[in-house]
Structure formats: structure tokens, C-alpha cells
Image: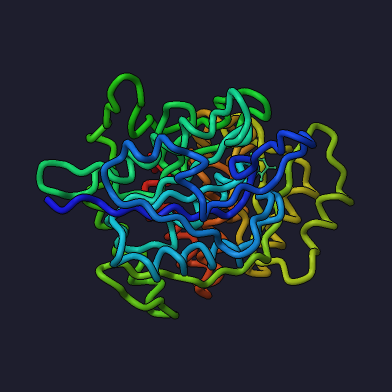
């Protein structure tokens, strides 16, 4: 078997910082001298290249255009490498992972996204562990020579998680990410144990059905089985409910110019106040062709509309179910579907269908 070739793509974030020993200031790490900075890489007996994507940025500054640039870089290098490690700030890493998982149709190579809480050039950094294990996972192949994890994932503190299932939960500890509603795809201890029953080796038939719908609109170019979809539309808003929320606030959000989709962050299993003005606004949004999706403020578990009277009225107002998906996933999936000019009916159908293992529909 030919030895694997891995490409590291650095986009920014804490991981790419080193401490200047004289001034103690954090400075950007030079990924062109990767092997000098991380000598442990010599112990991998395969080829590793590293590139920096534009100017490194803090991930709080990321926009969908940066996701497009990342996808271009994966597409341009797809036939030359067997796996990709994307280094990224942690703050918006889960959004990037979700969006990429929808963009990369037919992905059969690992795209492992990682970063760190402490700069790679600092004593006690978690960056080296995260980087080295991510490279090992990106290069791992089974007995048939196929990638062990042909998915967009986040690796952090010994856990490999499906990217579109993750949420950042910790701004200090090394365990920065969690996948509340889906099991880990691998755990790194003395050995890396892969959870092969959960890894998407054969995408569900719903995946191709979804992409066929998107293809009727506009479509990316195919490359070695990979087709990248670059379209997005960010005319969406998130409204977090709280007891006592005022009509003025809800109306102001509903009247946002250009709005195409609204994500409601509801209570418990998807419940909302039964106030008439609130339900009237939802009906009005439905009439205006604006998609409304119900996600819960409870991150573990699923939305079950109709379980209580307080969610039945949302169902009647045409609100869609976000099921057990993360907020990051719903934001990026809506941007993706709206970008392809899907009709409201198509969005209704695709939001209730798994494209990249992002949701469990009961
Ligand atoms: N603010 C940084 C970022 O997300 C934090 C990090 O890198 O973890 O880019």
C-alpha cells in the first residue's frame, strides 16, 4: 500500500501561536517551518505538507466566504492527498465543520478539524496532542486501503466527533467540544479505537436524494468523486425565547429586511409561549414564505413538536422541526439550502432529512 500523504491547512486561531521567549508576546507560528517547530512529526513515516490559507484569522472573524476558501483548497488538493487536517480557532469551529460537511458531496477522505486552547508554542499546550492525533487519524486506512473516517470531523482532547454534531462548550478547559446527541467516532487512548458502526462509510440514500434536489438549481464541479457546493445565503436570524419576551422584540426580528429563515430557540422539547400575538407573528412569517425552525435551548435530546399544547401551535403555524441537531448545524444547513434557492417545500423536506449524518429523525 502506498504511504499516505497528508495536507495541513492552517486558517488561524490559538493553535498557530508561539510565545516569543524575549518579549513573552504571542506571535504567529510559521507553518512553512512546521517540522522545526514540531519535531515529533519526523516520527510519522509519511509525507506531510502544510499551507496557510490567506492571512491567519481569529475564528470569530470567520464568514461563509472563508468556508468557501477552505472548500476550494480541499478541492484543489483533493487528488494529491489522502487526508486533510484543518487547523482552526475553536470559537466558530463547529460552524465551519457543519458547513463543510454539507459542501463536500461524495467525500471519501478524512477532513479532520482541530485547534487548541493553548498556543502550540507554549509549555503545556494541548495543540501538539491534537495536531499529532489528527494527522494519525487523517492517515488511517483499513485493510482495504480505504480511509478509516471519510467524514468532516472535529478532533479535540482525545475524541473524534462528527463535525456537524459538535458544539463548543468550554472556554478554558482542554475539553472544548462535545457531541451531545451522537456518539464519538473514535477515542484516542493508548490505541485509537474507531467506532466503525457509526462512521458514515455508505451515505444513506437520502444523501443523494438531497443533492439531486440541489443539483436542479446550481451545482459545483466534480473531482475524483468529490463535488463541492459553494452556494450560501446568510439571510437568517436566531431568536432565543425567554419568559417575558416582548412583542416588540419578536416583531423587530420578524421584520428584518431580506429575512428568509428564522431559528427559534425554544424551551425544553420545543415549547414556546401561547400568546396570541406570538402565534400570529409565526403565521404571518409562514404566509411571507419565511422558514421558521424550532431548536431547543436544551442541547441534549430532541425537539418533539406536538408533545405539549405549547408546541402544537408552532406545528400549526408551519414551524419546522430541528429535531436533535445543534444550533450550528441548523444555521449552516439553512444557509446552504437557501443558497441553492430551494422552495419552502424543498426546505421543509430537506430539513427533515439527513444529508451528512447531522440529524436523527424520529
Ligand atoms: N479566539 C480564538 C479563535 O477562535 C480561540 C481559539 O483559537 O481557540 O480563533
Which residue is rendered at x = 33% and y = 65% of the image?
78
Above or below for 343 versus 58: below
Q: Quadrant of the C terminus?
A: top left
Apparent side of residue 204 relative to residue 230 in the rendered image (left or right) = left
Quadrant housing residue 235 = bottom right
Q: Quadrant of residue 199?
A: top left
- The answer to which of 250 and 153 lies nearer the viewer is 153
Closer to the camera, 49 or 292?
49
Which of 66/286 is in front?
66
Query: Compared to 222, does 254 lie above or below?
Result: above
Pinpoint residue 255: horizontal percent, then vertical percent.
Answer: 80, 64
Ligand 1 quadrant assignment: top right
Residue at the limit of the structure toward the top, as seen here: 190
Q: Position of residue 280 (x, y in %)?
A: 75, 54
Q: Nearer the viewer, residue 32 or 78?
A: 32
- Residue at x 23%, y 34% (from the top left corner): 197
In the rendered view, would you say 70 is above or below 152? Answer: below
At a point 65% along the width and 61% down the height, the residue shown is: 55
Q: Is residue 174 visible?
A: yes
Is residue 309 visible from the viewing direction of this image? no
Residue 142 position within the rendered picture, expressed as x and y whole percent measured from the top left: 16, 42
| Image spot of residue 72 (x, y percent) | 46, 69
Snapshot quadrant of residue 335: bottom right
Residue 297 lies left or right of residue 258; in this view the side is left
Amino acid at each position: 500500500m502506498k504511504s499516505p500523504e497528508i495536507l495541513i491547512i492552517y486558517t488561524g486561531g490559538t493553535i498557530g501561536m508561539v510565545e516569543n521567549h524575549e518579549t513573552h508576546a504571542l506571535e504567529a507560528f510559521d507553518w512553512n517551518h512546521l517540522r522545526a517547530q514540531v519535531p515529533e512529526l519526523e516520527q510519522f513515516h509519511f509525507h506531510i505538507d502544510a499551507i496557510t490559507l490567506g492571512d491567519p484569522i481569529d475564528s470569530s472573524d470567520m464568514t461563509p466566504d472563508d468556508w468557501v476558501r477552505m472548500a476550494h483548497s480541499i478541492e484543489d488538493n483533493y487528488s494529491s492527498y489522502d487526508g486533510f487536517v484543518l487547523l482552526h480557532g475553536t470559537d466558530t469551529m463547529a460552524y465551519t465543520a457543519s458547513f463543510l460537511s454539507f459542501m463536500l458531496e461524495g467525500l471519501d477522505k478524512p477532513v479532520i478539524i482541530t485547534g487548541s486552547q493553548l498556543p502550540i508554542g507554549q509549555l503545556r499546550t494541548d495543540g501538539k496532542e491534537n495536531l499529532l492525533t489528527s494527522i494519525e487519524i487523517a492517515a488511517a486506512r483499513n485493510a482495504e486501503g480505504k480511509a478509516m473516517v471519510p467524514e468532516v470531523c472535529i478532533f479535540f482532547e482525545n475524541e473524534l466527533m462528527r463535525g456537524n454534531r459538535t458544539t463548543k462548550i468550554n472556554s478554558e478547559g482542554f475539553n472544548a467540544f462535545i457531541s451531545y446527541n451522537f456518539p464519538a467516532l473514535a477515542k484516542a487512548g493508548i490505541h485509537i479505537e474507531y467506532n466503525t458502526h457509526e462512521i458514515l462509510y455508505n451515505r444513506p440514500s437520502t444523501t443523494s436524494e438531497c443533492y439531486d434536489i440541489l443539483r436542479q438549481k446550481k451545482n459545483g464541479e466534480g473531482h475524483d468523486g468529490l463535488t463541492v457546493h459553494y452556494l450560501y445565503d446568510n439571510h437568517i436570524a436566531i431568536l432565543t425565547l425567554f419568559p417575558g419576551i416582548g412583542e416588540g422584540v419578536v416583531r423587530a426580528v420578524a421584520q428584518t429586511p431580506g429575512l428568509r429563515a428564522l431559528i427559534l430557540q425554544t424551551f425544553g422539547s420545543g415549547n414556546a409561549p401561547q400568546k396570541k400575538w406570538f402565534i400570529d407573528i409565526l403565521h404571518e412569517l409562514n404566509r411571507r414564505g419565511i422558514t421558521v425552525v424550532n431548536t431547543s435551548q436544551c442541547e441534549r435530546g430532541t425537539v418533539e413538536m406536538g408533545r405539549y399544547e405549547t408546541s402544537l401551535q408552532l406545528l400549526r403555524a408551519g414551524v419546522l422541526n430541528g429535531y436533535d441537531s445543534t444550533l450550528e448545524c441548523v444555521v449552516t444547513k439553512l444557509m446552504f439550502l437557501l443558497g441553492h434557492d430551494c422552495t419552502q417545500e424543498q426546505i421543509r423536506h430537506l430539513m427533515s432529512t439527513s444529508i451528512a449524518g447531522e440529524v436523527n429523525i424520529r
